[in-house]
Each structure stands twice: as structure tokens, then as C-alpha cells.
Amino acid sequence: MSKLSVRKTVSMWAAAVLGFAVSFSAFAADPLKVGFVYVSPIGDAGWTYQHDQGRKAMEGALGDKVETKFIESVPEGGEAERVIRQFASDGYDLVFTTSFGYMNPTIKVAKQFPDVVFEHATGYKTAGNVGNYVARFYEARYLTGVVAGHMTESNTAGYVAAFPIPEVLRGINAFTLGMRSVNPDAQVKVIWVNSWFDPGREREAADVLISQGADVVTHHTDSTAAVQAAEDAGVWSVGYHSDMSKYGPERHLTAATHHWGGYYTKTAREVINGAWESTRVWGGLAEGMVSIAPLNDEVPADVAKQVEGVTAAIKDGGFHPFQGPIKDQGGEVAVPEGKTMTDEELSTMEWYVEGVLGKLPK
């Protein structure tokens, strides 16, 4: 029996013996210990910031039932394995590992600590004590692409991308499809920086894209560098992860934003109640795991209304960003009319849609 099951059983036995209603927390001397492993600094915007906001929301919802700790700026690979193992060794009951490159270290450590629950973000591997969670970022990406498609004058957007993995490719393709749904001449140039968080390289990539004619810049990296570069150059930006408008007060159009508080609270509550099971969760607009930030005042009212309509259609299942017909970069039909890409196909995406310029790195 795991230590979590033991705690729950002892609490129920004690309540029965004493013969009056007492909450579980009255008998659980120790709160659920929850650890978070972050790949970049928390800062005040971006990927890690949103996860930390989720951690705080969980604390607010569960109060003294949980005790949390985080370690930020943990590189993927060997160092991540060490940090994850340390959490488990220190008696943490639940550990969230919040970057794609933490997947294999999480699985490895989980085998050595079968009584600890692990949750890994954005990957695809699970185990008996490892769950997996990710958001349908591409839904919000499509919406921001609709906005960008209306607002561009050069018909060129620039995209600062981290690593060529399916998650990032879905975002690039969804953004491009959104742009071209309202502006068939729109195209997207991509620069890969091969890092989740490197403000210097992100800024340099954004500057290059702007010099190549992009009048809208977006990114799938963790810092605000691309938004700041766009603001300085007087071109539009679309933020990612969180609302980055304070870094682009004039030129920030909107952002695809992520929200983890509900999931973190639900998961911790399940562990406390002994009801947790390993699952793969993929939530989107309908589940409140993604949304878009408020639109810039310069976005016309009819565009805002159109975005609201597409949002509603995605939420109720009437529209999917990856429903056919969709052509690939070479002009061949990749998704026929009447078909929609399955989650499995989306999870293994390794191609560009029509309108993305440049060669996909191997």
C-alpha cells in the first residue's frame, strides 16, 4: 500500500472510531507536498510564469492541504533528473515536471519511486505513477493568426521558434492557417533558436525577421524578447504563454495564453483523496486551459467579432483548426476536405502547411 493510501485509510479509521465528522485534514498531520520543476526563470511573463501562477492558484484553492516548492531554471537532461529525484527523495508526494525535455528523466525517476505521483507537461510517455498533460495551444494560436492576418500590411509574419518538435510545429501551422483563413496571401517566416529560453538569441531572431519584411512577430520561446523587438521596431507582435502587452504597450496585438491552475488543483485534490489515476490530458479553449489575451484597441470591431465567433465554434466542436482541406508546404493535399486530423496525427506532426516559408530542420 502506498503512503498516500495509508494516510487516507488511517484518517477514515480514526473518524469512525471517534464517531463524529472530522475532515481529512484534521488527521493528516502533514499536507500534501507538491514539487514543481521549471525550465526557465519565473519572471513576470512567459511559460514558467504561467505554470507558477497555476501553482499559486492551487495553493489558494487548497490552502493548508498542500505545501509547495519550486526550482526554476533547471536544464533539460541530467540536471533535471537530479532535481526530480531530489524531490522524490525529500518525501514529495506529487511532482510536476513542466518541460518537454523532462519526459525521460521523469519516467526514469518514477520507476525508482513508485509511491510518488509524477505529472509531466507536453510529452507523450506515461507510467503507472506518471500522468501527462498538455494544452491545445494550437486553438489559441489559430485565433491569434486570424488577428494577425487582418492586421498585416506586408502579408508577412515572423515566427521565433524553439525546437522542431510536434508541439511547436502545431503552433506554427495553426497560426499560419489562421492568417490565411482571412488573408490567403499571408506567409510566415520561421527562425529556429534551438532553446526554450535565450532572450539574446530570441531578440536577434526577431530583429532578423523584421528586417526581412515581417510586420507581425510572434514566438514559441519563453521570454518577452520578440515582443520587445517588435515594439522597438514599430511592428505588431503576438505574445505567447501569457499576456505580454506591458512589454509592447502600443504594438502587442494579443497573445495565446495558458492556464494551469484548474488542472493543478484537480490533480492535487485527486492525490489527496486517493483517486488519482495515470491519464493523458489534452485540454483547450472549452476546458479553459488556453485563451487569448485582450485585443489591442487598434483591432477593428468586426475583426474582434469574427474572433469571438471562431472561438465559440472551436469550443462547441463546430470548427477545428486542422480540418480539411489543408495543403502542405509543397501544395499537396495533406488533410482532405471533410476530414479532421486526429489527436494522434497532431501529436506526431512533422510538416509545414502551405504558407510557411523555409525548410523544416531535421
Image (spheres, grey):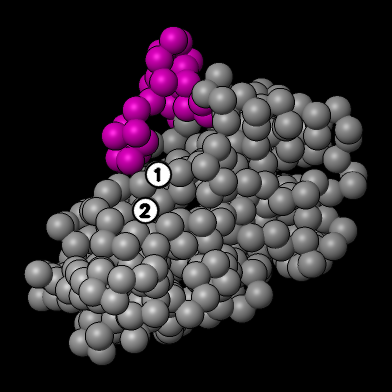
Q: Going by the image, does 91 lie left or right of 337?
A: left
Q: Secondary structure at mark 1?
A: strand
What's the mark number on residue 260?
none
Q: Which residues are magenta?
A: 320-349
Depth order, front residue of 24/316: 24
Find disc 2 in the rendering and name its residue.
133
Q: Is residue 172 visible?
A: no
Q: Going by the image, does 134 lie left or right of 203?
A: left
Could you tell me the amino acid type at mark 2?
Answer: Tyr
Q: Is residue 199 visible?
A: yes
Q: Is residue 57 above or below residue 68?
A: above
Q: Secondary structure at mark 2?
A: strand
Residue at image position (43%, 76%) is 65
Residue at image position (33%, 67%) is 272
Q: Main secondary structure of the magenta part?
A: loop
* Quadrant in the rendering for residue 9: bottom left
Q: Is residue 136 magenta?
A: no
Residue at image position (45%, 10%) is 337
Horizontal and vertical percent for residue 294? 77, 49
What's the mark number on residue 282?
1
Q: Are marks 1 and 2 in contact (CB under 8 Å)?
A: yes
Horizontal and vertical percent for residue 12? 25, 68
Depth order, front residue of 238/29: 29
Residue at image position (39%, 76%) is 25
Classify mark 1: residues with Cα within 10 Å, few (<14), some (14-19) or many (20+).
some
Could you tell me the amino acid type at mark 1?
Answer: Trp
Depth order, front residue of 51/224: 51
Say which label, 1 or 2, has the lower sequence index: 2
Horizontal and vertical percent for residue 144? 67, 41
Horizontal and vertical percent for residue 245? 77, 61
